[in-house]
Amino acid sequence: MEKRQVVIIGSGPAGYTAGVYAARAQLSPVIFAGFNSGGQLMYTTEVENFPGFAQGIQGPDLMMSMRDQAERFGAEIKYEYVTAVDFTQRPFQLWTNFPEGAGPDIFEKATPEELQAHLDAIRQAEPAMTAAAVIIATGASAIMLGVPGEDEFLGRGVSTCAVCDAAFYRDKITFVVGGGDSAMEDTLALTKFAKEVHVLHRRDEFRASKIMQERVLNHDKVQVHWNTTVSEIAGEGSVQQIKVVEDGEAKTYAADGVFIAIGHRPMTKVFQGQLELDSHGYVVTRQSATEAGVAAASQALEEKGLVKFPSMTSVEGVFAAGDGVDVRYKQAITAAGQGCSAALDAERWLETQGTVNA
């Protein structure tokens, strides 16, 4: 069993940035990157809104550069999943084995009861590693529609972030799928560039806030299609058509871009029962932009009125960053910033414990 000062779980912008800072602090961090490292940016083509790249950069290239930078300073990267944790005692324990016959999909397909049984079975083995401090950066994945063409054209006309990609659709015909605030935000972002923005919603009214609904419904570039579901996304090389069922009738529309905005799913099931999670599964920290986060922050005020270790979770010594925490922005740059904060908090907390470089 390996013993480490800092373990980082996750390999997106938050995880790799935390790795850079923790490695530069001589904490010899280990980053568990999973089998498919790099996070959601590995499925993104051109990234134009990450500072420092005036001409843009391909998503995979950005993530590989972040990985190389973390390794350069001494972070060790393991292409394995953390499959179970025990945060009830220190040092914290982490497992990387799967139950016999099971794989990573147990975290997606299992019911809460089945998942708990899997976690209990995993913990019967000896832990793979212990850590004095842990940084969680497992991110979140966009909830997809599950229709033909969706995976094929991801990054080639199918997107889950209009704020990221809207500028690529200047004078194009675009479709947004969803009816919540995120869908409204995506729609309004696209109106600044696209020629047409069609909103597809499966019900006859939006669930978004009234003010967001009004902005969308009153915009002259927007056409709303009520009682509409997507059946297929089609094209050759890139998106060219979207097929829908609208008021019970099958229709096909020309399309250059399809933006899926039906929500995100934080990748945090492995931490159930170990950390405070909100009702949607996001990790609660002292800087979470939620009521639970405000409550946690108010209980951690120092004498000068500052929040102590803002990235700390409900367990002392466990920190979290990135899209698994962020309920609002979900941008690569905000995730990277949170990764920096978590690494600095972990370093300073370890100093208070007298365990830095011990």
Image (spheres, helix red, strand yellow):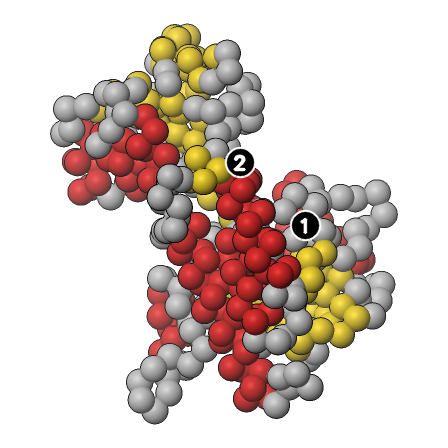
Residue 141 in sight from this viewpoint: no
**Residue 4, image x, y percentages:** 71, 73
Q: What residue is at 37 percent from the left and 83 percent from the top?
A: 301
Q: What residue is at 50 percent from the left and 28 percent from the top?
A: 154
**Residue 73, image x, y percentages:** 61, 65
Q: Quadrant of residue 335?
A: bottom left
In the displayed structure, 94 sits above or below 181; it is below
**Residue 82, image x, y percentages:** 70, 57
Q: Quadrant of residue 10?
A: bottom right
Q: What residue is at 14 percent from the left and 24 percent from the top?
A: 220
Label 1: how many Cα within 10 Å (few below 14, some 14–19, many 20+) = many
Q: Nearer the viewer, residue 154 or 140?
A: 154
Q: First in sequence, mark 1 or 2: give its number.
A: 1
**Residue 221, image x, y percentages:** 19, 23
Residue on which disc 1 sits: 34
Give the spatial CA distance, label 1 vs label 2.
16 Å
Q: What residue is at 64 percent from the left and 59 percent from the top?
A: 71
In the displayed structure, 23 sits above or below 357; it is above
Residue on which disc 2 sits: 43
